[in-house]
Amino acid sequence: MHSGLLVYLMGPSGAGKDSVIDAARERLAALGVEVVQRVITRSPESLGERALGATPEAFAQMRQEGAFALCWSANGLWYGIPATIDACMADGEGVLVNGSRAHLPQALARYPGLLAIMLEVRPEVLRARLLKRGREPLASIEARLDRNGALLEQSSQWQGEGVLIHRLDNSGELANTVEALLTLISSAVQRS
């Protein structure tokens, strides 16, 4: 049983999830919510986020050993949320993870009480951010933008089926997004 709160923050690459998390980190800790790093199959130097890098072979071994509570593949990479979140939640602690929109149904199946938060940005802002990062060729960026549109449609369908997804627009000031995030989490912590 999981008695603590799982905050499942989602959004497209370039939406600013890491910036929001970093800006909220101290206040999240004050609320009793720990930010849990995910494991990604690319080198730590190229991550662009606070994550743990692993080779594909090491990731596969970790997965086989049950090291992940949740894991998925996207954009040619593997992502894993450490199984340590279960112990934290069993102790009544809250955890925030950088999750996958496409993997939300599987996350809900394992953690039906999770707080699903979708970080969104206007398409032109997202495109500009991805271009500014310079991590990918233009064709990959365009593919990400197309995937983002499809996942937004899919999440709208999930909401129509009763899945509660809180949407936060991060197209503007970071401070406003952080305040909205903390308000959502604070309310959820008080209810749990």
Image: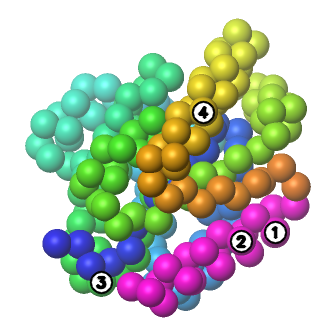
Q: Is residue 102 above or below residue 180?
A: above
Q: Which numbered circle lies on residue 85? A: none
Q: Which numbered circle lies on residue 180? A: 2
Q: CA distance from mark 2 to mark 3?
A: 23 Å
Q: Nearer the viewer, mark 2 or mark 3?
A: 2
Q: Residue furthest top?
A: 139
- 2 and 3 marks in contact (CB < 8 Å): no
Describe residue 185's horizontal placement relative to residue 181 as left or right.
left
- 3 and 1 marks in contact (CB < 8 Å): no
> Where is residue 130 drawn, in percent x and y?
76, 30
In terms of depth relative to the viewer, which is nearer, 123 or 67? 123
Describe residue 13's horizontal placement relative to residue 190 as left or right.
right
Q: Secondary structure at mark 1?
A: helix
Mark 2 or mark 3: name the one nearer the start of the chain: 3
Colouring: rainbow
| Residue corresponding to mark 1 | 176
Residue at point 38% right, 74% down? 5
Q: CA distance from mark 3 to mark 4?
A: 34 Å
Q: Amino acid at mark 4?
A: Glu
Report the span colored magenta: 173-192
Q: Amino acid at mark 1?
A: Asn
Residue at point 45% right, 73% down? 34
| Residue corresponding to mark 4 | 153
Q: Is residue 38 above or below residue 71?
A: below
Q: Amino acid at mark 2?
A: Ala
> Where is residue 35 drawn, in percent x and y?
48, 66
| Residue corresponding to mark 3 | 92
Q: Is residue 175 magenta?
A: yes
Q: CA distance from mark 4 to mark 2?
A: 23 Å
Characterize the local packing of mark 2: few (<14), some (14-19) or many (20 or more) Cα atoms within 10 angstroms: some
- 2 and 1 marks in contact (CB < 8 Å): yes
